[in-house]
Image (spheres, rainbow, N blue to C red):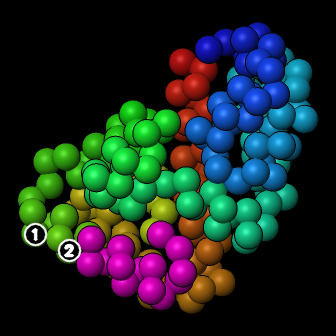
Amino acid sequence: MTIEMLNELEDEELYETFEKCCGASNWIIGMMNARPISSITQLQNKADEIWSQMNITDGYEAFTHHPKIGDKKNLEEKFASTKDWAGNEQSGVDDAKKDVLSDLATANEKYFKKYGYIFIVCATGKSAKEMLDIIHQRMNNNPDDEIKIAMGEQHKITKLRLEKLLS
């Protein structure tokens, strides 16, 4: 898709397009209202600006649009519209050993119980073992710090997906 094509989308299709990049409805509406966009740089800058205005509730909403790291079944069933992007982002788990995947599933559950939302990490380029190490490290964070980290990771994912959208 080109910037020109993005600018020409009808509202419903534009909403669905931006939702594939980030599931926070306030961010999506902000991005829709930012049109017309003149360049990829402006699009990325607007994404930064709008995300910086989001609150914790927006973060929680965005997180619900992601499968758990390593959960291939959930990726296929619940996240069909973004499974290609998310699957590619999580490709580091493809060759993981069963014990690492099992440990990752256990860590995901512990993380969810502690923080109340799924573990969010920009998984692109990371192995399953690296993600497992990251989740273990982040389990030591207090909730206020962790939500900021998770929201930062969400924004990294969003920006990568905006690049994919326009590639």
Most prominent secondary structure in the magenta stretch? helix
Q: Can you say whether 148 is above or below 42 in the image?
A: below
The residue positioned 62% from the left and 14% from the top of the image is 1
Residue 107 pos. (x, y %):
31, 77
Q: Is residue 161 left or right of residue 57?
A: left
Question: Which numbered tag is attached to residue 103?
Answer: 2
Q: Can you say whether 89 is above or below 113 in the image?
A: above
The kind of residue on which mark 2 rests is Asp
Query: For numbered disc 2, what is the local secondary structure?
Result: helix
Residue range (magenta): 105-118
The kind of residue on which mark 1 rests is Asp
The residue positioned 79% from the left and 60% from the top of the image is 54
Residue 80 drawn in magenta: no
Residue 110 drawn in magenta: yes
Q: Nearer the viewer, residue 148 or 117?
A: 117
Residue where numbered disc 1 is placed: 99
Label 1 crowd bin: few (<14), some (14–19), many (20+), radius 10 Å = few
